[in-house]
Amino acid sequence: MMAAVVLMSSAAQAQMALVSKGKAKAHIVLAEDTPTNREAADMLSRFVNRISGTSLTTATGKAAKGAIVIGERMSPETEDAFAIDCQDGMAHIRTGGGKGAVYGVVTLLERYLGVSYYAYKAYTFTPMSTVALPAIHISDKPAFRFRQTHGYGNQDPDYERWFRLENSPEEFAGNLWVHTFNRILPASVYGASHPEYYSLINGQRRPGSHSQWCLTNPEVFELAAQKIDSIFKANPDMKMISVSQNDGNNTYCHCDACAKVDAYEGSPSGNLIRFVNKLARRFPDKQFSTLAYLYSMHPPKHTKPLPNVNIMLCDIDCKREVPLTDNESGRDFMRALEGWGRISDNIFVWDYGINFDNMVSPFPNFHIIQKNMQLFKKNHATMVFEQINSTKGTDLGELRSYMMAKLMWDPYQNADSLMRAFVHGYYGAAAPYIYKYVAMITGALLSSHTPLWIYDSPISHKNGMLNDQLMKTYAEIFDQAEAAVATDSTLLARVRIARLPLRYSELEITRTKAGQDAAEVSRKLEVFRRQCAQYGIATLNERNNRTDDYCRLYQTRFLPRPNDNKAAGAKVIWNSAPNPPYQPIADKALTDGLYGGTSYVESWVGWEGRDADFVLDMGEAKTFSRVTTDFLQQLGAWILLPKSVSYSYSMDNKKWTDMGRKEFAEDRDVAVKFIPGTVTSAAPITARYLRVRVQTIGLCPPWHYGVGYPAWFFLDEVTVE
């Protein structure tokens, strides 16, 4: 992974030689023999060896000329800060605490020894037999004291060090750092005997793995305090823990005592902050982090978090096509951020830059990253977590991780320069084309005025940034990019991985169109399948639906074929219509021969918490023996299988004969699934009308995110054969 770079230092400028003609001229001295200083020394020696073929030895003791001293303390101390001084034949890498010594070494390597790191085990340097340092007098410190990305590059320890990233197990005792209520007081232990510990929802206590606590119950507080005390005692070097709501929205307690506090505070966060403040008083030497997430996003009107209470504020509901100040979802979050900023200097922002439902799909948010990061800094955030590309193949994930990490350290750098530096180093001769593509698809997104959402589908953008003409232009750009690096297998692989989101989008959009060429679609599907397998792109979404399964399913479910459904184009007569957002497509979607995909935002027709009942008028009497309704399961979106589907038939839409009923078993698998509801008759049936009735399960069960609230079910094609 070596490429030529221009180094700032030369023999004429050198203040200190590290290696001369392949022989070590410097050595490393540890000011203190600590694990972090050892880590810094090891990193420096390894990279000098990669550059020159010569390692630097490490020792402790008195430093003299020729020494690189690592780990002397700066004053004043600031976590992860560092200073580098090089003059008169000696160098000093000082630390302000934390991993400052490591980050000082990274800066030395990057700025003065010509090493550039881009992605997972992807870096460049110029081999040299002579390595020297110029005069150096610099210092630096991070904008945020904690910086983490959820990128696959973090599996490379050098990558994590290089981009100054941290991870939650290093910060949070017992790795309790988000959605911890059920881990602290498991409903499986306390729910049956003490349902009063859990949320009152729709008039009933509902203990479950996703239910919240009744925060005004004093017994809950004492039990939680005891458990937290034991966790800290088991982790004596840890100072921080998360005491935070389980995942799910509006599942907080509605009992009279909790409701009274919520009303006074103007937000369900009031109960939460009161509870965590009590813990903070009980353990004044510890830090307590809690979520401001979904229902608890907005701050309370009266209660202020204590200084040792950390607010983990999440912008999950915000659209991403513009900065947070520029659309209503973002402005609502900004009201929350500014409100928390007025009452706390201890804010942890959880930001999202990923499409959970379609990770291998275009997500052009690069133009908002810097502006949002500056907003976080301005409003007193001290910690930032960026939930971005957790798996390989996520849209331009390496570039997004690079920019996020760089801007978390310093949000006032030139973001365009960062992008240009990355694409030049990572894509080589293909860089101009990748940069052009990012600029073009970003402009297309903005001009389309279509929101960019973390549960998006490419189909949402088929008339905008992914319209036919633009897709043709993107393909031409990537053809040029591939040609530019055709002789370099590493660079070609990177370009092809960057192109996969467009290939996936083309397949997804194609399945929504009638009259497509099956042979051509099959060819494109095979290219996508083969390249995903070749480059290790395993999953398509947060629910771990695998790419190979998608390709097999596409062959049987989505590949264009004649619509042999005897109910094709049937008129729909509604007895119990779907929810209003789905009514505009419902009359056609149920029998058009086009099947819905893994995102409920297209093709699917949904009912919330109530039964479905409709009649298909096939126009004339037809003979059939089997009926199938296609159902979606997507647990993360509160879309569960119904209790049952039943069919009956008639010649006159008055007198009905039962055909049969399909019962569905409960399924807790988080993978997105398509489940058929099929009933087969022993003898052929002749009828004009078919009645479909779907019985809901009613409320989401205790194990689900939406415990106590109405469950959705979604259906698409009704096939009569």
Image: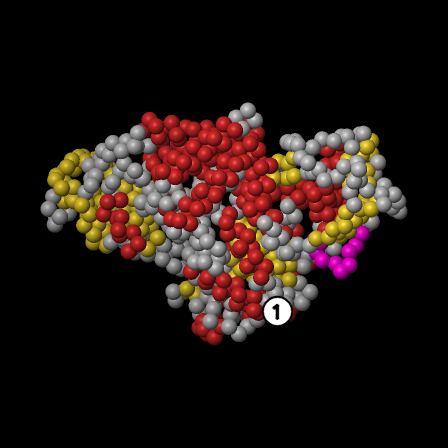
Q: Residue furthest front?
A: 12
Q: Which residue is mark 1?
A: 306
Main secondary structure of the magenta stretch = loop
Q: Is residue 180 above or below residue 511?
A: below
Which quadrant holds the C terminus?
top left
- x, y percent for residue 162: 66, 44
Which stretch did the figure color magenta?
Answer: 70-82
Query: From the viewer's perspective, is 545 left or right of 695?
Result: right
User: In this orientation, which residue lies closer to the viewer: 494 or 545?
Assistant: 494
Query: From the viewer's perspective, is 631 left or right of 423?
Result: left
Query: From the viewer's perspective, is 30 left or right of 267?
Result: right
At 29% from the left and 51% from the top, the residue drawn is: 582
Residue 624 within the magenta-colored segment of the rendering: no
Look at the numbered disc 1 and give the secondary structure of its residue. Answer: loop
- x, y percent for residue 624: 18, 36
Name the residue type under label 1. Leu
- x, y percent for residue 323: 48, 55
At 39% from the left and 49% from the top, the residue drawn is: 447
Which quadrant holds the N terminus?
top right
Inspect this view and state whether residue 180 appears.
Answer: no
